[in-house]
Image: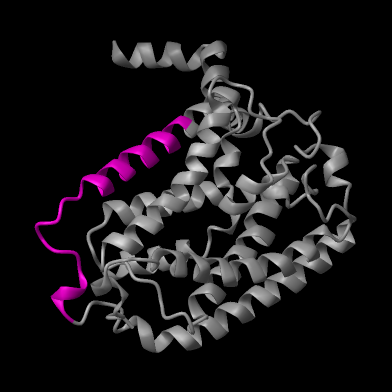
Amino acid sequence: MDGSCGTRCSADPNVRSSVASAPASCLEHFLDLAYGGVDHTLPGNGGAPCVAFLSLGQRAAESVLMVGVSLIEMWFAWKGLRGQLANLVPRTTSSVAPVGEPKVVRTLLLCLLSLTFGMEMGYKFSTRTLIYLLNPCHVVTVMQIVVLVLPQCRAALILFRLQLHMLNGALLALLFPILNTRLLPCETKVYYIQHVLLYLVPLYLLRNEGFYQAEPLGDWSWGLLATGLLFLYHFTVLQGLGLLTQVNLNNMICPAISDPFYSRWYRLWASGHQTALIMLHGKLLTIVSRLRAPSHLLRPKLN
């Protein structure tokens, strides 16, 4: 009986066609969720005119240049960090927050950040624009959620110091917001809440939990490593997927409508001013976090 049923089912042309088309249908459905809802009619959102903003030759030349620069930056950063990583743990237990100290604020920040990111994912699912979750601010959001979840360990401290120097995107998002694609209820409010939380989390950890300390102000290795990683991510992953899908991921395909350096050289301008911003921004956050902070947190106890 089982054999006859299998024979009949396999002989049915409708069943065979539906089974054969299932993988393709799943892939098409996933791609539609990823970028099917991107509106290319909105300025700076993507589409053929956005892709044609720069010639293929210029894109290739800039990519080779900036990938090379990013690798050099990471190499110099690694030379400076190689001796630090082995000792990137507290020398004494006094460098961490007291055991009995309440973690209510930390738990609240974790809940708020997770809820905000979950709402962002919901917006992306409903608008079929999941590809935008690859933008750096969402990546940094995930990094901060991991830091808040992890116990105090070397991996958590490495992630913390990297994300501390990757918040330039949050600053630009607050100064030059792009809101013409946010049309759902409360979507604009969630945008601002997310980027404000990206600042509150590291500032809280710097001021209130002694384990999460920034490197000394004279150490530029972490900022250099973050710069190299961000440039490599932009000119490989974001640009590659942007060209394949014609989606302007973090303005790697064409400039934003609010870009003050709007021209065919906008990416080179951005590479220059973002290098300076990344290198200085994390140091400024460190200085701000130390203003009137408890004295036991100001004493450097980590390498």
Q: Which residue is located at x 82 percent, y 60 percent?
A: 59
Q: Is residue 76 above or below residue 110?
A: below
Which residue of the protein is positioned furthest toward the left in this rendering?
A: 100
Query: Is residue 124 among the parts visible in the rendering?
Result: no
Q: Is residue 149 left or right of residue 76?
A: left
**Residue 90 occupies quadrant:** bottom left
Across and down, in percent, residue 227 comes to 59, 69
**Quarter containing the C terminus:** bottom left
Q: Quadrant of the N terminus?
A: top left
Outermost residue on the front side: it is 292
In front here: 117 or 18?
Answer: 117
Residue 156 visible in the displayed image = yes
- All told, the count of numbered labels is 0
Q: Is residue 210 magenta?
A: no
| Residue 219 x, y percent position in the rendering | 48, 83
Q: Is residue 24 above or below residue 289?
A: above
Coloring basis for residues: one colour
Q: Main secondary structure of the magenta part?
A: helix
Residue 201 horizontal/vertical position (percent)? 38, 52
Question: Measuring 30% from the left and 14% from the top, which residue is drawn there?
Answer: 2
Q: Where is residue 296 shown, x and y percent of the image?
A: 23, 73
- Say if 25 sits above or below 97 in the image: above
For residue 100: magenta? yes
Q: Which residues are magenta?
A: 92-119
Q: Which of the pair 258/70 is nearer the observer?
A: 258
Camera-side residue of 22 and 297: 297
Q: Which residue is painted at 40% across and 58% down in the image?
A: 202
- Residue at the spot x=61%, y=79% of the render? 73
